[in-house]
Amino acid sequence: MTPELYRIIEHTADTGFEVWGTTKEEVFGAAAKAFFSIMWQIKAKEQRGPEKIEVSGGDLEELLVNFLEEFLYLYDAKGLVCTGIEVESIKENKVHARAWLQKFNETADLELLGVKAVTYHQLFIGQRNNTWTARIFLDI
Amino acid sequence: MQELTVHNLRQIDQYRWLVPRQGKMRTDGMLFLDRNLLEHVKNDKSITQVANVAWLPGIVGRSLAMPDMHQGYGFPIGGVAAFDPDEGVVSPGGVGYDINCGVRLLRSSFTKDEVKDEIANLVNNLFINVPSGVGSKQPNLKLNKKELKKVLETGAQWAVKKGFGSQDDLLHIEESGCLGWANPETVSDRALDRGQAQLGTLGSGNHFVEVGFVDTIFEETLAKGIGLFKGQVTIIIHTGSRGLGHQVCGDYIRLLQNAARKYNFDLPDRELCCAPVHSSEGRQYLSAMAAAANFAFANRQLITEEVRRTFEQVFGRGVEKMGLQLVYDVCHNIAKFETHEVDGRQREVVVHRKGATRAFPAHHPKVPAAYQETGQPVLIPGDMGRYSYVLVGTDRALKETFGSTCHGAGRLMSRHAAKKAAKGHNVTAELAEMGVTVKGAGRATLIEEIPQAYKDVEDVVRVVHEAGIACKVARLRPLGVIKG
């Protein structure tokens, strides 16, 4: 992952990040990748096909929160981590993506940060001068 | 009275700062701070958040903030607000993601000298017996969804019924370890999925189990009344409702955002979303929140049993002989129906405490029989290197803060800053030098939670004590800690 895809924003008790992209899809993908690299350090990527992910939300902000929360759910409930993501389309308040999922390996992989939730705190997603930007804060 | 220009605050006395009602605020705000803590608070948006809470419909009394206040999501951490059950609202942002994150304290009949050679052994065994870390799972407890729903319905009572602890434990838990209005059917399948394997686990971040000892007694009679003596070994357990609670909060923030639109609420922040207490959305949230709170009560009860088992392993003696009794268990993140005196009459209100502790005085009917003469024990954990406090609730708290006080130290440094500060330091070795044996699931957590990253909890406790919204009883120092 290229580090310049996102920027960490930290206040005393808050951890958040900012991401950029030329399309909505790109910025959703970048947000997911930033989220993964904040949460885990995965030693080895398994060679297996992606799974389809579909998430819906009332508006673009809610969609972004729900999209990231999906990975928190997969991790907490099923022990799955995501090593790759391709956001195919965002339309009619739905995001369609392909995610490369694998089981978290207790001995090799590292949990970097215990994220409780993706919040609406100072949440932003929008377009400025042909660039899509998103800002998300996590509850740690 | 003194006028201050910063944030339009008006200083009432040494520890009270009024945020005067203005704009769309329906009431004043009140901050319990000294000048030094106020300087910290000015660096974030928490005073604005106190003012924002005052916008909410049906708020009763003032929008309050305790001295450990800092910026939260929607409500500030350290925020307390009460709402009228008919005209008022309930807000998931007023409780937080970690529903019923809380603390319990156990006492023992050991003195510090009797355990000091076994601390490393204790910490290692606690680390094995109490699953910790981000996605920690409990291997010895397989719950199907039906059983999990029973946990959500009856909380710590479920645990005791299954043999984890005693009836006596239940008498020493806020609300006896069960919020009766919980309804598991309002908890989503996703939340159940996240909680199913996590009952009896510590989790990560600032959650911990700490073996310590009473190093100072401030009030001999009160200490005696709650069974504490100088040099006595104590155990603190700090954790909450794990992924289940986080999911419930997230689910209901989604639902209540629509409700806020439906009921035409004018909100300054999306995270303040809320619904009328008696609306279907409000009632659903309260039932689901109570279910998550019950999960947390059961969680702390199970961990207590693991702690007792570990002591048995290490010392080869029975729990009763070691006097491993529950002193008390308090919620730090909760919304509850409580009766309070407002403008001279008793009325029911929905009190939100987000990073705040209930602090009811002696002779209050909700205080257990054992503490009728002392007041309800209040447990304030500090960072892992310094100390924690035991206080009791006061009449003044009941009068001024809906019977609430502070809950902890609060961060001073961001996680990034903590990492930077810890660079080149061996955190475990330095803590060992301070007399504290620490074992953490993740090295990252240990570094982010270094003592320097937190305010000195003594500064916070001094304010609540001097302001009279709790009374200091004893100070505890850590000997051994396991961190999530």
Image (spheres, coloured by chain):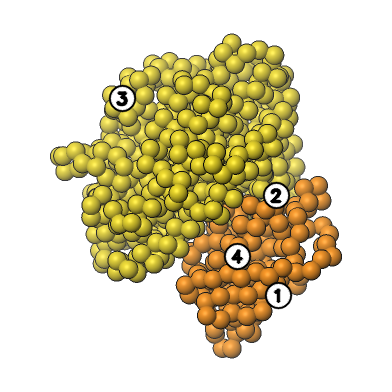
Chain colours: A orange, B yellow
Residue B346, placed above or below residue B270: above
Q: CA distance from mark 4 to mark 2?
A: 22 Å
Q: Chain letter for mark 3, please.
A: B
Mark closer to the observer (2, 1): 1
Using the rendered image, report if marks 2 and 3 lie on a common chain. yes
Visible residue check, residue B240: no
Front-lying residue, B406 or A104: A104
Instruction: Determine the image quadrant of residue B114.
Output: top right
Q: Chain letter for mark 4, please.
A: A
Front-lying residue, B49 or A77: A77
Q: Chain letter for mark 2, please.
A: B
Q: Write down the residue under mark 3.
A: B362
For label 4, the crowd category at 10 Å Cα-Cα, with few meaning under 14, some 14 to 19 and many 20 or more, is many
Q: Write down the residue under mark 4.
A: A68
Residue B141 % position (x, y): 64, 35
Q: Are marks 2 and 1 in contact (CB under 8 Å)?
A: no
Q: Among all residues in the image, which is located at the extreme front?
A: B146
Q: Write down the residue under mark 2.
A: B444
Residue kind at label 3, given as amino acid type: Ala
Secondary element at image label 4: helix
Secondary element at image label 1: strand
Tag on residue A86?
A: 1
Mark closer to the observer (4, 2): 4
Q: What residue appears at the point 73 percent right and 30 percent down from the top-left corner?
A: B124
